[in-house]
Image (cartoon, helix red, strand yellow):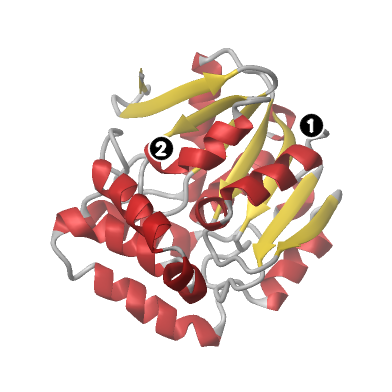
Amino acid sequence: MELLLPDGARLAYEVGGSGAPILLFRPLGGSLVCWDEFAAILARQLRVITFDPRGAGDSSDAPCTWTTRRCAADARALLDHLDVPRCHVYGISMGGMAAMRLAIDQAARVDHLVLASTVPCGLEFRYQALGRALSLATCLTMHSADVDACLATRVLSHSFRADHPDDVDRIQALARARPTTRANIMRSLAAASRHDARGSLSRISAPTLVLLGERDPLPTCASQQELLAAIPNVRRELIAETGHDLSAESPARTAARVLAFLGK
């Protein structure tokens, strides 16, 4: 389905399942089809709302001035369109940045908030992650149709890639289903790097779960402590033997944590 936004941009979205609504914010790259098993498990108990942010999937291109706050505003417009006054929100990586923006700017709209594999400031990464960052940057030199598949693979932990080759092939196929252009990925990367919600985290009123993969090399310990110290009603959980993309590497375990947090 498609929503025409006030500025003329198109927002592709899907709704599945029934029950209390939950809105899912994508990480960098891929499209809403990449939620795959994770969304399917949630949809057994929840009404799952997924969408392609601008610059991804079937939505319009991201503007040069793209920000996580504008992504959150698009999500709010989608909730208005679907007549959803309040919902649970899950955001991972860059999607977590947009999710925290929605929870800050539209606190009354967010029932429970899950921030997975994310940081309050886009520039807060481990020095040890520089090698992984260079590996991701290499993806941008590939043919446009392969950039998404490369990013989806490189963000996975080394152990997962070695132990689950069939799952890696499936993740790559999903990413290739609706590939993102190199220009849109660059604009999204710029939006993530400009993100800084550190001064506003105390305005998040929703009960919040911070999820982190045990093998995730990207977020710093300091960035996670900032989330825990600044958000009023927050708790943190670690998912063992899992890397950065929790919902791709461990969809069942991640969905179980989310559902337990929501009291399901």
Closer to us: 260 or 91: 260
Camera-side mark, 2 or 1: 1
Q: Kindly identify which residue carries mark 1.
A: 264
Q: Is residue 82 left or right of residue 238?
A: left
Kindly identify which numbered label has been placed on residue 146.
none
Q: Amino acid at mark 1?
A: Lys
Q: Residue at x 77, y 70 (%)?
A: 225
Q: Residue at x 53, y 87 (%)?
A: 128
Residue 206 in view, yes or no = no
From the viewer's perspective, is residue 181 above or below residue 41? Answer: below
Closer to us: 177 or 217: 177
From the viewer's perspective, is residue 47 above or below residue 224? Answer: above
- Marks 2,1: beta carbons within 8 A: no
Residue 216: percent from the left, percent from the top? 58, 71
Q: Bin the neighbour count of mark 1 within 10 Å (Cα to Cα): few under 14, some 14-19, many 20 and up.
A: few
Q: Amino acid at mark 2?
A: Leu
* Distance of label 2 from label 1 (alpha carbons): 23 Å
Upstream in the sequence, badge 2 or badge 1? 2
Q: Is residue 107 left or right of residue 120?
A: right
Kindly identify which numbered label has been placed on residue 32.
2
Outermost left residue: 143
Residue 62 in view, yes or no = yes
Residue 67: percent from the left, percent from the top? 44, 50
Residue 155: percent from the left, percent from the top? 43, 66
Residue 120: percent from the left, percent from the top? 63, 61
